[in-house]
Image (cartoon, rainbow, N blue to C red):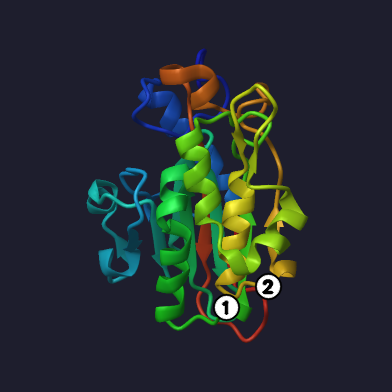
């Protein structure tokens, strides 16, 4: 519904898009994914490491949406059946995590700062503290800026490289390549995928249960919004996962 420069399905309410168009985009998106709009938990994203416990904002099955959106957090966790958690991205890495046995879920917004400072690790820790086991977690890594597009300064490259857990660096680089590429005579490029993969593996998530869905938000103009490419006139993607509650089968979450 959104018109230029927010073509297609912009799902951010704070980037200057027509509120009517954004509301319609949300309605259509919710219908496609399969959740009720009043049960979508989003937060005020600040490139930090806080994981919001959405369960504390649900009373008698009703989510306090306004309070949730006012909370500053870059990850959200819930175990309430039918409640969805979502993060908005336009180059940062979205991760959706589900416990296939217990049904609790989390959504993570990981920019380079948040990833370096541990938002992925802290969110996994919140899931484990809430009863999950690492072996039961599945993770989807969504479209984000890829290494070919992600030119960075030397200080950022060093921070990303140093944040990769040593014990799983080789495995992550086998899957996604080096965390930092330094071309001769040029600025370095960084791979956020390598960093988050190493963090997931170091936390005990099984390699076979991690799915990178692909997509370079910056390079693929026809498919994705990108803040690096379009600046302030960029829309946002929304990545959502819905809690289904405990189950005896291995299909406890929908993303």
Q: Is residue 27 above or below residue 187?
A: below
Local SS, label 1: helix
Circle 1/circle 2 CB separation < 8 Å:
yes
Q: From where the camera sits, is residue 86 visible?
A: no
Q: In the figure, residue 8 lies in which quadrant?
A: top right
Q: From where the camera sits, is residue 118 visible?
A: yes
Q: Report the residue that reaches farthest toward the front.
A: 185
Q: Report the residue that reaches farthest toward the top.
A: 4
Q: Residue at x 65, y 34 (%)?
A: 182
- What mark, if any, has residue 105 been given in the picture? none
Front residue of 220/80: it is: 220
Q: Is residue 101 above or below residue 154?
A: below
Q: Position of residue 216 (x, y in %)?
A: 66, 34
Please give the residue where the numbered disc 2 appears in the rendered image.
206
Q: Residues within 10 Å of mark 2 (few under 14, many from 20)?
A: some
- What mark, if any, has residue 134 been given in the picture? 1
Q: Residues within 10 Å of mark 1 (few under 14, many from 20)?
A: some
Q: Quadrant of the C terminus?
A: bottom right
Local SS, label 2: loop
Q: Position of residue 236 (x, y in %)?
A: 49, 32
């Amino acid at each position: 519904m959104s018109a230029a420069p927010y073509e297609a399905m912009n799902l951010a309410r704070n980037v200057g898009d027509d509120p009517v168009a954004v509301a319609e985009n949300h309605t259509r998106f919710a219908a496609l994914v399969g959740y009720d709009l009043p049960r979508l938990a989003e937060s005020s994203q600040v490139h930090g490491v806080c994981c919001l416990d959405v369960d504390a904002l649900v009373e008698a099955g009703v989510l306090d949406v306004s309070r949730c959106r006012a909370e500053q957090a870059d990850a959200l966790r819930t175990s309430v059946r039918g409640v969805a958690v979502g993060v908005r991205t336009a180059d940062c890495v979205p991760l959706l995590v589900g416990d296939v046995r217990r049904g609790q879920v989390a959504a993570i917004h990981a920019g380079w700062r948040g990833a370096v400072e541990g938002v992925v690790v802290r969110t996994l820790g919140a899931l484990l503290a809430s009863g999950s086991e690492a072996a039961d977690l599945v993770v989807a890594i969504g479209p984000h800026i890829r290494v070919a597009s992600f030119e960075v300064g030397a200080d950022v490259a060093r921070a990303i490289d140093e944040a990769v857990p040593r014990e799983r660096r080789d495995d992550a680089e086998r899957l996604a390549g080096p965390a930092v590429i330094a071309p001769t005579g040029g600025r370095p490029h960084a791979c956020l995928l390598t960093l988050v993969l190493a963090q997931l593996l170091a936390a005990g998530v099984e390699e076979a249960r991690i799915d990178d869905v692909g997509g370079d938000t910056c390079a693929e103009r026809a498919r994705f919004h990108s803040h690096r490419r379009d600046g302030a006139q960029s829309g946002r993607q929304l990545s959502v996962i819905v809690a289904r509650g405990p189950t005896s089968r291995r299909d406890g979450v929908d993303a």
